[in-house]
Amino acid sequence: MKLSHFSAALSLLASTALAIDINVDDPASIKNAAGIAAKKLRALYPTDEPWFIPGEFGLIQTEDGKNNKGYYWWEAGAAMGGWIDYWAYTGDDTYNDRVMEAMLFQVGEKQDYQPRNQSLALGNDDQGFWGIAAITAAERGFPDPPEDKPQWLALGQAVFNRQAGRWDAAACNGGLRWQVFQSNKGYDYKNTISNGLFFNMGARLGRYTDNATYIEWAEKTWKWSREMNLVDKDYAIYDGSHIPECTVSSSIRWSYNAGVYLAGAAAVYDYYKAQKNEAKMAEWEEHTMGLLKATDTIFFNQNSEYPANVMQESACENPPNNQEPTCNTDQRSFKAYLSRFMGQTYQLCDFTRDFIMERLKTSAEWAAKSCNGPPDGNTCGLRWGFGKYDGSPYGIAKGGVGEHMAAMEVFHNLLAPGAKAPLTDKTGGTSKGDAAAGSGGGLSEEDLRQTDPSSGGDRAGAGILTTLTLGGLLGLTFWLIKE
Ligand SMILES: *[C@@H]1O[C@H](CO)[C@@H](O)[C@H](O)[C@H]1NC(C)=O
Ligand SMILES: *[C@@H]1O[C@H](CO)[C@@H](O)[C@H](O)[C@H]1NC(C)=O
């Protein structure tokens, strides 16, 4: 072989070996692709760093080192939920011990995913992402924690009960506020993701336990979300409403909101299906299909510059003219949740299957094409419609958690057809529950006083710390204390 041929063959070999190769109709190939993305995500989980805390991805440095930001605490909860599904769909238990460690480390002093360290910036949505991870663990039959530790179902119930206790009828006629504590910026915002997660948890706990109280809460939250127009008559979902106006004040549409309501509706449908309640089944089939179809233009087929059926975070990816995307660290992970919730919906609602699989397959093919970035040729980009790596930041101090979680989840959710549907306690779920978990006293002033300000997260915490003295902080009334 001539040298030039040899090197051409070598580089061909290199390029095929490096990008993620996926055949979306072959489970082994799908597992392989999901495995590569899962490993890339794991490489960003800083277990080898001296500052490692289980359940925290840690710092992202800026170029000048002056405006370093962390991943928010919730995103690790989201990743744990992603790895639980990864294990359930692929059978690869490589990450299970790390998931167990983080999920138990972060339960908080009251075993409700409200750890003291997060109290300066704790949103219902942050807590909710850990809550849905715990519920996923119960539904997927993830290994139970040791007996002397809190159990998955009980943890999900604890989060749900805390949030039910914060249902706020005094403003906007109901719903949850974004922030848990009055002193945090965002306490005057009723954001959709907080309410969507609460809806999703209620629906799934109701389905899992067959306890109608959870479904009543889910239906009440749904009704409120519609009345508030956070979910509009055409099932478009907006970001949130400020108090006291209570009209949609941010109409941005994010894919995670679409996903969280979709899978919640699917779970309510399945709950009524188990009861053979045909009127309710028809009602929730309509909602589920309405929510699903409303994802199409905005998250799959809006930009003719993108190939058809490729998932996109259209509020920030900016595909049309190749401008830099404006997605922040959080938003880079949102496609993971739309993928995840489409997979769950696929499992629960047979009438959604063609629509979902057509989009997940094409999205996964294009996500795989985005995974040919340096340094190892397997780094995944943000914008799948690009057809190649788009230069997204990657590295332990640079970013990439969202991109790799999203790639992993769009891959492994292709395995939904061959996987067991989420369990309930009638279909093999064994996790121990505690209907009263999280209904006692929550964080107190005393807890807050002991909070290390530097560990409170920067979203709201940094803002209030610069404007309030610690004494001022302690003088404020906290919602939870009223419990
Ligand atoms: C809380 O923050 C402290 C200080 O950073 C850290 O040592 C501890 O491990 C954290 N605990 C949790 C549960 O995150
Ligand atoms: C059903 O859930 C509600 C709300 O958490 C709880 O108060 C009640 O005890 C539960 N019922 C049963 C039978 O577990």
Image (cartoon, rainbow, N blue to C red):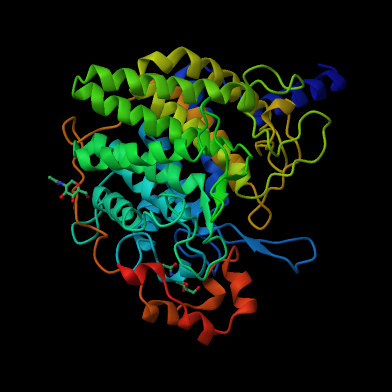
- Quarter the C terminus occupies: bottom left
In the image, residue 373 sits, relative to residue 189, either above or below, namely above
Residue 108 drawn at (x, y percent): 35, 65
In this rendering, position of residue 253 left or right of residue 208:
right
Depth order, front residue of 15/456: 456
Depth order, front residue of 328/190: 190
Depth order, front residue of 205/137: 205
Q: Is residue 34 visible?
A: no
Which residue is found at the position 57% from the left and 61% from the top?
58
In this rendering, position of residue 390 left or right of residue 139:
right
Residue 193 drawn at (x, y percent): 49, 45
Which residue is found at the position 42% from the left and 44% from the top?
197
Which residue is found at the position 28% from the left and 23% from the top?
280
- Quarter the N terminus occupies: top right
Quadrant position of residue 266: top left
Which residue is found at the position 60% from the left and 76% from the top?
465
Q: How many marks?
A: 0
Residue 298 drawn at (x, y percent): 63, 27
Depth order, front residue of 30/159: 159
Q: Is residue 300 visible?
A: yes
In the image, residue 197 sits, relative to residue 65, either above or below, namely above
In this rendering, position of residue 457 left or right of residue 167:
right
Residue 186 drawn at (x, y percent): 56, 60
Residue lying farthest to the bottom in this orientation: 471
